[in-house]
Image (cartoon, helix red, strand yellow):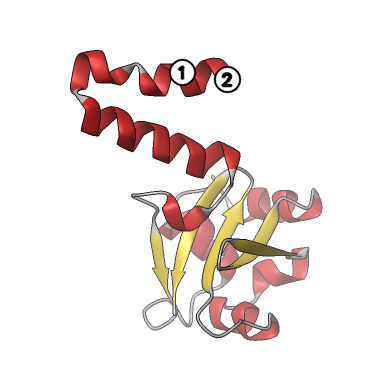
Amino acid sequence: MAVKRILAGEGAALHGLEAATAARAEFTACFSTRSFGDVQDLPIVSLKDDTDEMLGALIGRTLDFAPSISAVRRVAQQEGLRLSRESNGDQQPTPLTEASVQQTLSAVVSEVEALEGAELYLKVGRKVARIDV
């Protein structure tokens, strides 16, 4: 982990100080503090646009995070499917069950108590998408 952090900072010699600082900040966001809000270029799903699509289909087809709905079910069985609420640097993950795969995204989000001002994220194994409310 320390070597990766050093390499992220070594980009200054090749790409400049600004790029090295950005690389180090993104590395810290991804691997150290695990704050999804600091990671750039996360895929976004919208509750308004994807309200009628089942969660399994959304993950498999729209986000392309899994090859099939069956694969999404397996991730849920292995407790790798989570809905995370992030507020003030505090993250509260909620494991989603195999039954959640057959529900709509809006139904899954409504079951989880979203905190006022909290950002919502869908985590499928190691892949993460931001949920636009």
Please state which amino acid type lies under the numbered disc 2: Ala
Q: Secondary structure at mark 2?
A: helix
**Residue at (61% x, 51% y) in the render:** 124
Which quadrant of the structure image shows residue 89?
A: bottom right
Residue under pointer 1: 6
Q: Nearer the viewer, residue 125 or 12?
A: 12
Q: Is residue 98 left or right of residue 22?
A: right
Q: Is residue 29 left or right of residue 15?
A: right
Please state which amino acid type lies under the numbered disc 1: Ile
Q: Nearer the viewer, residue 122 or 30?
A: 30
Vertical placement of residue 103 versus 3, above or below: below
Contact between marks 1 and 2 (CB within 8 A): the answer is yes
**Residue at (39% x, 83% y) in the render:** 48
Point out residue 91 in the picture as x, y percentages from the top left corner: 64, 62
Vertical placement of residue 49 versus 19, above or below: below
Q: How many marks?
A: 2
For residue 2, which numbered disc appears in the image? 2
